[in-house]
Amino acid sequence: MSRAVVFLLLLLIAPLVRAETLQVALYDTDYPPYHFADSGHKGLVDELLTRFAEKYNHDIQYMLVPEVRSQHLLDVRKVDVRLESEQWYRGNKQYYWSDSIAVVEDILVMPSGCHIPAIDKLGGYVLMARFGYTYPQFEALFASGKLHREDFYSEIDMLKALVDMQQNQRVAVIAKNTLQWYASKNNAFKKFTVSDYSVGKAAMQLQFAYNEKGKRMSEQFNEFMKNLKSSGEFAKIESNYQ
């Protein structure tokens, strides 16, 4: 075999050799417009990860699991990264964090015609929340017993419950963009009463394992996001999910 042929073969094989696997834990339920459990429906996070993998020649392997399970998998190094926010995280372990992917604004939602009181007036209400999520604004009310919590595994389950609800002592906390996405698909969800104030804003980020791989991957992803934003491409991508 000639040197030229060997060289060409090495050029063809090299990209495959350099490919590095990135194990990603994402929700096993939809979280529009950021993520969809159905692989045929791409969300903002999914698209960004796909583009990132293509740019850096990474092989992404997804694991779709419940929120609490994804944190455990990251902590025991079964995955390299998951979706989270430093503001939401309530543990004491160290991680590498990406820059902001999106800003999530939570609002309160009730059936049509209901009055949504201020947060400090929610005594006696039941807060409909996502299982495994933390809500700093309500923790003191939970601890005192003034506000009770009812967990759901997805926003769509909360919204369906609100549609069928006859009494008005339950209030759901949902990301504003998520509600808007579902309302664009179902007219029944356009009739809810929505709070005129937000109950929290947080940067959605990627939470990487605290090891050499996590450090390297987080630095690459932040470089990727910086370039995407400075070129104006990120704004174009984001507009597709609003």
Image (cartoon, helix red, strand yellow):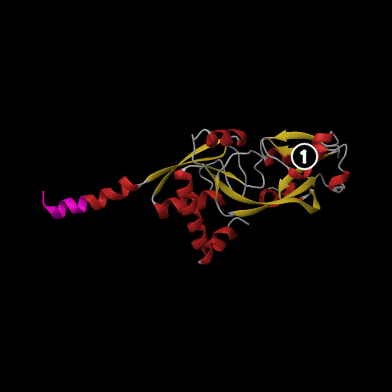
Residue 63: x, y in percent?
Answer: 50, 37
Residue 242: x, y in percent?
Answer: 63, 57
Left or right of 108 on screen, residue 3 = left
Mark 1: which secondary structure?
Answer: helix
Residue closest to the eye, 168 or 50: 50
Residue at image mark 1? 139
User: Mostly what secondary structure, the magenta segment?
Assistant: helix
Q: Is residue 2 visible?
A: yes
Residue closest to the eye, 192 or 81: 81
| Residue sitting at x 48%, y 48% | 215
Count of picture labels: 1
The extreme bottom residue here reads: 231
Residue 107: x, y in percent?
Answer: 75, 49
| Residue sitting at x 38%, y 50% | 57
Magenta-drawn stretch contains 4: yes
Amino acid found under the numbered disc labelled 1: Glu
**Placement of 29 over or under 177, stated as above or below:** above
Crowding around mark 1 (Cα neighbors within 10 Å: few <14, some 14 to 19, many 20+) is few
Left or right of 82 on screen, residue 153 = right
Q: Is residue 232 visible?
A: no
Magenta-drawn stretch contains 170: no
| Residue sitting at x 74%, y 43% | 136
The extreme left residue here reads: 1
Q: What stretch is highlighted in magenta?
A: 1-9
Residue 37: x, y in percent?
Answer: 56, 40
Write down the quadrant of residue 140 in the picture.
top right
**Placement of 41 over or under 223, stated as above or below:** above
| Residue sitting at x 66%, y 51% | 181
Residue closest to the eye, 81 or 114: 81
Residue closest to the eye, 228 or 223: 223
